[in-house]
Amino acid sequence: MEEKRGTWGSKLKFVLAAAGSAIGLGNIWRFPTYTGLHGGAAFVLIYIIAVCVVGIPLLIAELTIGRHTQRNPVGAFRAISPKSKWVGLGYLGIITGVFILSYYSVIAGWVIGYIFVTASGSFKGGDEELIRKIFEIVTANPFIPILLLFVVIGITTYIISRGVQKGIEGWTKVLMPVLFLLLVGLAIRSLTLPGASKGIQFYLSPNFSKIDSLVIIGAIGQALFSLSLGMGTMLTYGSYLSKKEDLFSSSLWVAFADTGVAFTAGLVIFPALFTIQGLSPAEGPSLIFKVLPVIFSKIPGGLIFGTAFFILLTIAAITSTISLLEVPTAYFVDEKKWERWKAALLLGFISFLLGFPSALSMGSVKFLSSIPLIKIDFLSLMDIIWGNLSLIIGSLLIAIFVGWKWGVKNAVDEIESSGKRFAFKNIWQILIKFITPLAIILILLNTVYNYFVK
Ligand code: TRP
């Protein structure tokens, strides 16, 4: 007999789990990193538009496919469209999950390293030179980053192999609001530092001449990454959702919470950033690790708040890594009838190995730290390929699938099966059928034209 598929206990539990997947390093590490690289406020503006035009419609689409089919991505596309090429989209999601997990866990490892560095009082005095050195101690040698990567993947694999992620949502319910409050407190300190106005201007006053197709691609990619879209994570989470729940309002809550956390993280990083000598917004992946300690060194109780912050950020990261590992694991369990622990262990091990070059790309191996010709580090390259391009292509295909293959009418029927009318159904249909895919296609074509043809 088939085991009954688990469902979320209530709407709140579902929103918490989905928000737990969405909120993570994407908000606190990736959003400031990309905002800094792409010129500040203009990027923020496009990001917010992308959340509304691409993010929320797709979030609804993924949850709807998941709830309708009650399956992992491969099974879901196969169920709606048997014997077609659409299953390939499910496989793309599974591969993407493993690759994102590989480098995401490297950064989560740095965060764990920073718990210890902060707790040991190393940032006292806020000596900026020292703070830069500490980043190197944690990341620029072959041993510590790989050990920390092992710890992150180990915890994630353990949780997924036991299938206990739902136990974790219990305490994230308490801890995530605490993380948010800490962020708000840090934002207040950052905004009141002498010299903060330069950063506020960079973050909030858009310079429209900075907008080009790379900025827009980056912003769309960031919206998808932050909401865990484009590879079937939300589809898988939706498959555990009961028919009673109102998909639309759940989606809005998740998007709202996720965007709120990212925006606040920017308010922490940018005002402080411009008060630090020799640090530029385009610092790349190390940005927040160089700015946050300076803020902690300038607040009373910085040692305790700093340590607590990195602990909470670790937990936020783990609720995201488990959602990344859950997708491929669900595939092997559902489709290949593997035992859960076996699937989790194998996939965790693969991600661990795939994470090596990223872990070694912050100075310990020269070739990986600045790849010849493209001159970026391996971790950033992985993030561009899997965290941007693959999610964008996956999302484009999901929108086309729902809009044109499965059909918006079937999707709306599924959404309304909760018994509640989907008030924005006309807008959603137009978005998912035309606007979302067209926006993505145009911007991809424009980028190809700008960078390869012109
Ligand atoms: N959204 C998470 C974050 O912001 C990361 C994440 C989890 C993710 N699952 C995903 C990103 C699926 C893309 C796709 O940290």
Image (cartoon, grey):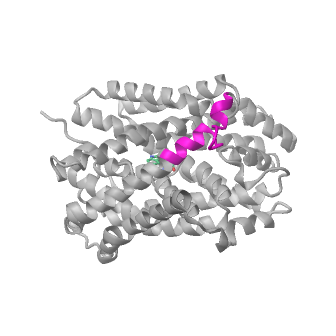
Residue 373 magenta-highlighted:
yes
Residue name at image x 28 percent, y 49 percent:
239
Q: Is residue 181 visible?
A: no
- Foreground: 94 or 18? 94
- Foreground: 323 or 143? 143
**Does 129 sit above or below residue 40?**
above
Q: Position of residue 326 (x, y in %)?
A: 37, 39
Q: Is residue 287 left or right of residue 446?
A: right
**Does 75 sit above or below residue 366?**
below
- Foreground: 160 or 324? 324
Q: Is residue 277 left or right of residue 180?
A: right
**Does 259 sit above or below residue 23?**
below
Q: Which residues are magenta?
A: 365-385
- Residue 40, quarter of the rendered image: bottom right
Q: Is residue 190 left or right of residue 208?
A: right
Residue 374 magenta-highlighted:
yes
